[in-house]
Image (cartoon, rainbow, N blue to C red):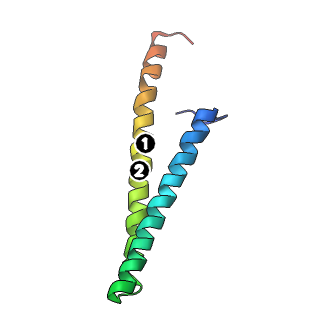
């Protein structure tokens, strides 16, 4: 995986991943907050929602990173013939 100047497409992918992570945390936290208010268990379900959202967000990021790595793998195989 290269690190360096990012193309506009790379920037879109990075931004999308960040937003998906944030939305996962926010939605699970909001769900936990709603459940706490409904059943009077504050703050435990909201805290559980934060952890669940973080885990879900990390799952999304890791899944996308693996997909990007697989998409980049054929490019690495092309360079094995000794050319630069």
Residue 47 place in picture, x, y as percent: 41, 77
Residue 21 place in picture, x, y as percent: 48, 56
Q: Is residue 81 left or right of residue 2?
A: left
Pointer 1 local density, CA inside 10 Å: few below 14, some 14–19, many at least 20? some
**Farthest residue, direction left:** 39
Q: Residue at x 63, y 34 (%)?
A: 8
Quadrant housing residue 64: top left
Is residue 6 or residue 26 the one in the foreground?
26
Element assignment for label 1:
helix
Residue 14 place in picture, x, y as percent: 56, 44
Element assignment for label 2:
helix
Pointer 2 local density, CA inside 10 Å: few below 14, some 14–19, many at least 20? some
Q: Pointer 1: what residue?
A: 64
- Does 22 appear above or below 46? above
Q: How many marks?
A: 2
Q: Pointer 2: what residue?
A: 60
Q: Are marks 1 and 2 in contact (CB under 8 Å)?
A: yes
Q: Is residue 42 left or right of residue 18?
A: left
Q: Residue at x 40, y 31 (%)?
A: 70
């Amino acid at each position: 995986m290269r690190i360096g100047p990012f193309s506009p497409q790379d920037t879109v992918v990075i931004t999308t991943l960040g937003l998906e992570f944030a939305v996962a945390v926010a939605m699970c936290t909001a769900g936990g907050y709603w459940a706490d208010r409904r059943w009077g268990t504050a703050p435990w379900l909201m805290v559980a929602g934060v952890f669940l959202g973080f885990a879900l967000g990390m799952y999304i990021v890791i899944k996308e990173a693996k997909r990007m790595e697989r998409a980049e793998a054929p490019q690495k195989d092309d360079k094995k013939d000794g050319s630069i």
